[in-house]
Every structure is written in C-alpha cells, then in structure tokens.
Amino acid sequence: DYHDHYVMLNDFDRNSYYQRALEKAVSACGTDCSVLDVGAGSGLLSMMAAKFGAQHVLAIEANPNLASLAEQNIRRNRPTLFPKSNVTVVAALSSAVTIDQMPSAR
C-alpha cells in the first residue's frame, strides 16, 4: 500500500519546505555538490536537489517498485529540469549500499 507516499507527494507545505531547504543547502555546498537521498520514493527530492545544481545525487530506495518509479520520473524530467546532473537510483536498503556506489564528489 502506497497511501502514505501519496499523502507526502500531495503535501504542499512539506514539499515547499524541502524545496527551500535543498535550494539553500545545495547552493551553499558549491560546485561538484553531492546529495544522498535515503528513502527516495518517487525521486521528488532527488530531482529537486539536481534541479538546484547538485552534480551528483544518489537516490536509495528499498522498495523496488518505488525505485523503478523514481528511475522513470528522473529519466522523464532530466532533459528539461537538470540535464547536467547525475542522478543514480539504487534499489536497496541503505545499510546495504557501499561506499563504491557513492558519488566521488563531496
């Protein structure tokens, strides 16, 4: 059941807060910024980070169906919203992700 996920996607105040926070954090990070999104779900926050200039985003999602959805969303939105960012989706528990799967930037 994905009810909780749909509720979060439609929570305008929550998403606006994350949008402002990501914009501030990514711009403060500077060039070659990396973002780790644990529990990426549909990829919304990963795409926000990439849109604000994160060069590398690692989106980790344990649910393979949601990870597939994130990949689709990212592929569809990359050309117009973040063509220069590298967003990688990993379908795994965050505890199973190794350092070699992380972007090499900061």
Image (spheres, rainbow, N blue to C red):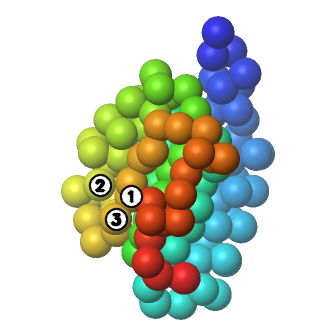
Q: Could you tell me if the residues under marks 1 and 2 are in contact, i.e. CB atoms within 8 Å? A: yes
Q: Residues within 10 Å of mark 3 (few under 14, many from 20)?
A: some
Q: Could you tell me if the residues under marks 2 and 3 are in contact, i.e. CB atoms within 8 Å? A: no
Q: Residues within 10 Å of mark 1 (few under 14, many from 20)?
A: many
- Image-based side of 61 in relation to 65, left or right: right
Q: Is residue 48 visible?
A: no
As rendered, which of 71 and 18 lies closer to the eye? 71
As rendered, which of 19 and 2 lies closer to the eye? 2
Q: What type is the residue that disc 1 sits on?
A: Val
Residue visible at 29% across and 55% down? 78
- Marks 1 and 2, how far apart in space? 9 Å
Q: What type is the residue that disc 3 sits on?
A: Asn
Q: Secondary structure at mark 2?
A: helix
Q: Which residue is mark 1?
A: 87
As rendered, which of 30 and 59 lies closer to the eye? 59
Q: Which residue is mark 3?
A: 86
Q: Which residue is mark 2?
A: 78
Q: Residues within 10 Å of mark 2 (few under 14, many from 20)?
A: some
Q: Is residue 18 above or below residue 26?
A: above
Labels 1 and 2: the sequence-earlier one: 2
Labels 2 and 3: the sequence-earlier one: 2
Q: What type is the residue that disc 2 sits on?
A: Arg
Residue visible at 53% across and 65% down? 99
Front disc: 2 or 3:
3
Q: Could you tell me if the residues under marks 3 and 1 are in contact, i.e. CB atoms within 8 Å? A: yes
Residue 83 at x, y percent in the picture: 26, 65
The quadrant of the picture occupied by the C terminus is bottom right
Residue visible at 70% across and 57% down? 18
- Marks 3 and 1, how far apart in space? 4 Å
